[in-house]
């Protein structure tokens, strides 16, 4: 996601240098700091003109003068852009420090929530209007890289202390506390940055494609037959168009390969996000809203299916529920997740630890609660796989809202926006592949009609 010396928190990794951009560039021209000591070029020219007869300027000198003026103008425009970028960065850092409370009264959100909101809002600004397979504009790509580098640079200063042995000049050793990047950041941040590089690379690869997009409102007035029909609830999105004979086999295979790649990235980002959310503390406000029993949370039908029999299949249960919308799926996810934590708490309460032997015993009721909690977790994972675009559950939203760990906030929001981008890329590729399939079927039907008209006897 530049030279690191240009900004204290700026960092660069070897695998994303293609998208690296310096945060701030120094102006390429210099100005005299003292106008009284250094004589101006105009003063020296006037002295020569008083002593010597100056020849009229040649065409070459006029061209050189225009070139120097053009360079000066470009330098001035570049410096004005840098000043504007500096002001924008100051504004963003001010909002982070104030916790989005512009009154300065200390009533804003904590730093972790402010940084999480900043990453989410940046993603919405850059990718919110992107609804097609194409590379980002240079302005949006520069904005994304510049501000993400700035926000992620905070992780370079989140460290943990570990004891180590240091050698003295006389050969003796002594123990000191050395700093190293926190383990969760060291493990997840480079992986997420690699996923981001791969996703942006997929978008950049669609600069020259055999398909194109048309506005659905303009296309509705066209007499041409459409090879793709979008759902009415997404009427504002552009529709992919392909040639009448469909895409070539090479382009089709390439699209399928990139779809599989984006799907794998989506799964990895979703797993990373789930792992980070599971490490966050459960807010007390959520615990107070939990039902008294897991059966009340899930309902009689789901509880009866989960508690009966030694074998449990979440796929069969979801097939039986026959969920038709993401709203229904999110409601089931909230209920099952609440019941899962009820069963976990009951299982922990049934552990009896003796005072002298420190031996943990688990009774049959606690064992049943653990089994139900495990089945609820497997049902949640299967539900998220069936509805990859599912919104965050009530627990996840509460964790993000009350989280105060800055490192977890950065990793969670970063993985969440990458998960969303990967899901969108898969959806866009699926739209193009569907348009290609419909176009090829229509072309095959037209060819069959032409052949049949040629071989049929004329009356």
Image (spheres, helix red, strand yellow):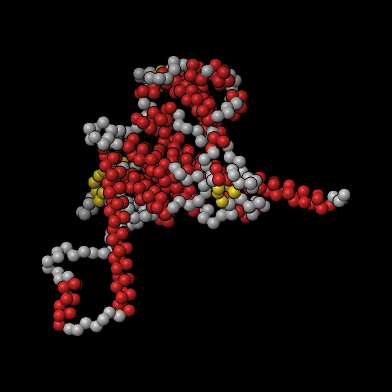
* Position in image of residue 123 (x %, y %): 41, 43
Residue 344 in view of the camera: no
Q: Residue at x 52, y 18 (%)?
A: 299
Numbered marks: total: 0
Q: Quadrant of residue 404?
A: top left
* Position in image of residue 88 (x %, y %): 30, 47
Residue 77 in view of the camera: yes
Figure check: 231 above or below 298:
below
* Position in image of residue 128 (x %, y %): 44, 42
Q: Is residue 4 left or right of residue 329?
A: left
Along the viewing direction, whichever of 422 and 290 lies nearer the viewer = 422
* Position in image of residue 183 (x %, y %): 37, 41
Figure check: 107 above or below 65:
above
Along the viewing direction, whichever of 344 and 62 lies nearer the viewer = 62
Q: Residue at x 47, y 25 (%)?
A: 334
Along the viewing direction, whichever of 41 and 87 lies nearer the viewer = 41
Q: Residue at x 54, y 56 (%)?
A: 208
Residue closest to the far left: 36
Q: Quadrant of residue 307?
A: top right
Q: Residue at x 26, y 36 (%)?
A: 102
Q: Is residue 459 left or right of residue 283?
A: right
């Amino acid at each position: 996601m530049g030279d690191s010396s240009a900004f204290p928190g700026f960092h660069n990794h070897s695998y994303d240098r293609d998208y690296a951009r310096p945060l701030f560039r120094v102006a390429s021209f210099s100005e005299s700091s003292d106008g009284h000591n250094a004589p101006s070029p105009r003063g020296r020219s006037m002295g020569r003109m008083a002593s010597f007869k100056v020849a009229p300027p040649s065409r070459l000198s006029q061209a050189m003068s225009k070139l120097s003026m053009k360079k000066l103008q470009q330098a001035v425009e570049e410096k004005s852009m840098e000043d504007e970028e500096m002001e924008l960065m100051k504004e963003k850092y001010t909002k982070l420090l104030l916790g989005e409370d512009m009154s300065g009264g200390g009533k804003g959100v904590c730093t972790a929530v402010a940084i999480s909101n900043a990453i989410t809002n940046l993603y919405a600004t850059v990718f919110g209007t992107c609804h097609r397979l194409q590379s980002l504009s240079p302005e949006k790509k520069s904005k994304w890289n510049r501000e993400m580098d700035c926000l992620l640079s905070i992780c370079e200063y989140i460290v943990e202390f570990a004891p180590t042995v240091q050698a003295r000049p006389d050969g003796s050793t002594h123990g000191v506390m050395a700093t190293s990047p926190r383990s969760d950041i060291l493990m997840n941040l480079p992986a997420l940055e690699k996923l981001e590089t791969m996703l942006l690379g997929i978008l950049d690869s669609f600069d020259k494609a055999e398909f194109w997009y048309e506005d659905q409102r303009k296309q509705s007035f066209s007499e041409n037959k459409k090879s793709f029909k979008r759902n009415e609830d997404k009427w504002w999105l552009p529709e992919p168009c392909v040639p009448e004979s469909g895409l070539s086999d090479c382009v089709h295979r390439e699209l399928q390969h990139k779809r599989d790649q984006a799907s794998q990235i989506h799964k990895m980002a979703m797993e990373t996000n789930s792992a980070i959310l599971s490490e966050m503390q459960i807010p007390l406000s959520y615990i107070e809203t939990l039902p008294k029993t897991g059966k009340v949370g899930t309902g009689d039908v789901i509880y009866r299916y989960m508690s009966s029999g030694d074998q449990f299949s979440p796929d069969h249960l979801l097939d039986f529920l026959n969920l038709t919308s993401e709203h229904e799926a999110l409601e089931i996810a909230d209920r099952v997740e609440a019941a899962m934590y009820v069963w976990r708490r009951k299982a922990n309460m049934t552990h009896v630890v003796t005072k002298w032997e420190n031996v943990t015993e688990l009774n049959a009721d606690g064992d049943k609660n653990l089994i139900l909690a495990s089945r609820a977790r497997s049902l949640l994972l299967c539900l998220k796989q069936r509805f990859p675009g599912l919104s965050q559950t009530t627990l996840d939203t509460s964790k993000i809202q009350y989280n105060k760990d800055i490192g977890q906030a950065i990793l969670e929001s970063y993985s969440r926006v990458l998960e969303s981008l990967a899901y969108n890329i898969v959806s866009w590729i699926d739209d193009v592949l569907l348009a290609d399939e419909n176009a090829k079927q229509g072309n095959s039907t037209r060819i069959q009609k032409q052949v049949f008209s040629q071989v049929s006897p004329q009356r």
